[in-house]
Amino acid sequence: MNSNPYLQQMKGSYLFTEIVNRTKAYTASHPDARVLRLGVGDITRPIPEPLIRAMHEAVEELAHGGTFRGYGPEEGYEWLRQAIIEHDYRPRGIDLEADEVFISDGAGSDLGNLSELFAPDNSVAILDPSYPAYVDTSRMAGREIIFLPSHAENAFVPALPAQKADIIYLCFPNNPTGTVLTREQLQQWVDYARENKSIIIFDSAYEAFIEEPGIPHSIYETEGAKEVAIEVRSFSKSAGFTAVRCGYTVVPRQTGLQGMWLRRQCTKFNGASYISQKGALACYTPEGRRGILDNLAAYKQTAQVLSDGLRSMGYDVFGGVNAPYIWCRVPQGYTSWSFFDHLLNECQVVCTPGAGFGASGEGYVRFSAFSKREDCEEALLRMQHVK
């Protein structure tokens, strides 16, 4: 048996696993410490009640012979796919067909699995820093990676690849930097993909946090994007489904990949659960939407608290306006990991070291506004009293 040599060569620890391990080691030696976790982008507010009620009703249906159901469609129930089109796309002038929308068990799965559509010799362009899964799944497949440095000096808008990239991962609003692209800037990427016959995998997990006008909520708001772009979205950050697991991916027919993705899903995926899809459908009811907006407003307020507090202490801060993440430059003399250790040991505050997102993330840390507001306020107070 020969194992995957590319997987063997990868680091033994995933970024967020390393953060958990270091935090566990600290709490084990300081059992009385109240550690404030502002690192991992996990949800802290409960799922809105209308969504919970819909999932309870779905569970009850499965308990009775007349309403029980087994396997659903691998691509998801059409009633959810139609609701997504009607509420997320059509109001923005984007027309889609139901068979171009695929329900999944979360954006993370699809972002990795989409790699299977492409030959191993395809090159991949990835913004640096970026969500680690883009890099890890590309390395698992043995692909050439073209890193595109993104930092304060280029306003976190990297130049287009100097060489041809077959696959391009874009995430906006961006994780980890919290920054965005204008429609004109995003159009440049679409034009590049059309000219080079590339495919863009567009991670739109944080679309619900966009507040400023002129910022596209979907890549399909740009001309020609249906020819070259696959869009991945999640109910995790908007509706609080991190534990429920439900998302969706749009693969337009014009990409030439829609049929391939359907074939892949039918072979390797038995579909998202009926319960999670009923909960997702409730996101589009008026009362479900109100509950989601209330939670989003709370996270946005927490992002503002974090941004203002860090700036008042003299830190260079980016993001936090159209995204739930605050990207913060570390003080002189620190690396990303040494500043992480400093905050953990001196302030009992957990952040995410920027170096874990790529070489260009060195010198930064990420704070998450998904934390409780009172924890963020307490963290800022602790940081004020520790140099």
Image (cartoon, rainbow, N blue to C red):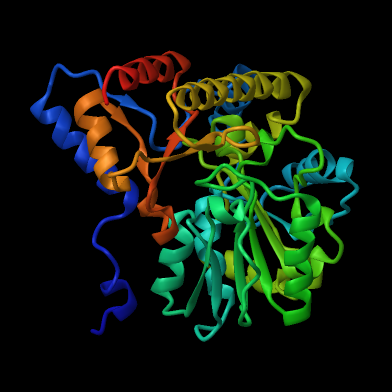
Q: Nearer the viewer, residue 185 or 112?
A: 185
Quadrant of the image occupied by residue 367? top left
Which quadrant, please, contains the C terminus?
top left
Q: How many numbered discs sit on the rendered protein?
A: 0
Image-based side of 271 in relation to 95, left or right? left
Q: Which residue appears at 60% of the width and 56% of the height? A: 154
Q: Position of residue 104 (x, y in %)?
A: 59, 51
**Farthest residue in the right direction?**
93
Q: Position of residue 306 (x, y in %)?
A: 49, 24
Which quadrant, please, contains the N terminus?
bottom left
Image-based side of 320 in relation to 87, left or right? left
Quadrant of the image occupied by residue 62? top right
Q: Position of residue 47 (x, y in %)?
A: 55, 23
Image-based side of 140 in relation to 61, left or right? left
Q: Nearer the viewer, residue 37 or 286?
A: 37
Is residue 145 shown to the viewer in this render?
Answer: yes
Q: Which residue appears at 80% of the width and 52% of the height? A: 183
- Examine the rendered structure and indicate whether residue 8 appears above or below residue 97: below
Q: Which residue appears at 29% of the width and 80% of the height? A: 5
Q: Position of residue 314 (x, y in %)?
A: 44, 28
Is residue 266 shown to the viewer in this render?
Answer: no
